[in-house]
Image (tube, rainbow, N blue to C red):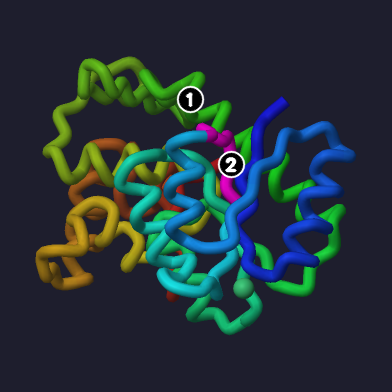
Amino acid sequence: MPKILIVEDEAPLAETIAYNLREEGYKVCSAADGHGALAMLRSEKPDLVLLDVMLPGIDGLEVCRRMRKESDIPVLMLTAKSREIDKVVGLEVGADDYITKPFGMLELIARIRAALRRSNRETRTSEALTANGIELDLARHSVSVDGVEVELRPKEFALLHLLMANRGRVLERSVLLDRVWGEDEYIDPGTVDVHIRRLREKVEADPSSPLRVLTVRGLGYKFAE
Ligand code: CA
């Protein structure tokens, strides 16, 4: 069974979560602060992290950023605030999902299962992603559309990879910017739209009415399910 790392400084909540996960058959380890969490990530090699945002010392967002530098383990953020901004920030730092406190154990377990399923699927297909007539081969760095190979520039390839790996999920412009261009350089957010347009010219039969790389008005983009 998968091992879950619980990072939560409220001991009663951490214990309740641990108890319920053990009842479901999961292995559990836990940490009460960020430094402990990073140490546990290395020593325990968990399969998923439940990460509270409000932690003493380094907060959960920073912990998530640091975890992302060394691992692509699924991270489910636990947040006390339901304000949209927290959710966005949670995903911007590379978290896979978030759940707002207070939450029920059934919901938590359902989210854990979904995140583990997604990560298994991504691992199995990490060499090649295939969807909607597009095959993206990571090892060969090649893309074919309906069996015909197309030439993508590196950023177009990275965008397509990110969208396909998160198929059906909306990725906001800021998230795409952060993951494809990195947080260090300043890039005009409109750059994303320009690259999406060029990408569509290569992977859509009719770039003006795309069926694969879809616009989600006011939010960003997603790859069609
Ligand atoms: Ca807390």
What secondary structure is marked by label 1? helix
Residue 99: x and y in percent read 67, 64
- Image: magenta residue range: 44-49
User: Which-is-in-front pick, marks 2 and 1?
Assistant: 2
Q: Residue at coordinates 50% horizontally, 19% vertically from top-left?
A: 124
Q: Residue at coordinates 49% horizontally, 29% vertically from top-left?
A: 122
What secondary structure is marked by label 2? strand
Residue 147: x and y in percent read 33, 16
Q: Return the residue nearer the eye: 188 or 208.
A: 188
Kindly identify which numbered label has been placed on residue 62. none
Q: Return the residue nearer the eye: 62 or 201.
A: 62
Q: Is residue 62 above or below residue 141?
A: below
Q: Residues within 10 Å of mark 1 (few under 14, many from 20)?
A: few
What residue type is disc 2 on? Answer: Leu
Q: Earlier in the sequence, mark 2 or mark 1?
A: 2
Residue 48 among those drawn in magenta? yes
Task: Quadrant for residue 197, please give it.
Answer: bottom left
Left or right: residue 164 versus residue 207 is right
* Number of residue marks: 2
Residue 219: x and y in percent read 44, 70
Left or right: residue 172 versus residue 24 is left
What residue type is disc 1 on? Answer: Thr
Q: CA distance from mark 2 to mark 1?
A: 14 Å
The residue where tag 1 is placed is 123
Q: Is residue 92 above or below residue 54?
A: above
Left or right: residue 100 versus residue 138 is right
The residue where tag 2 is placed is 48
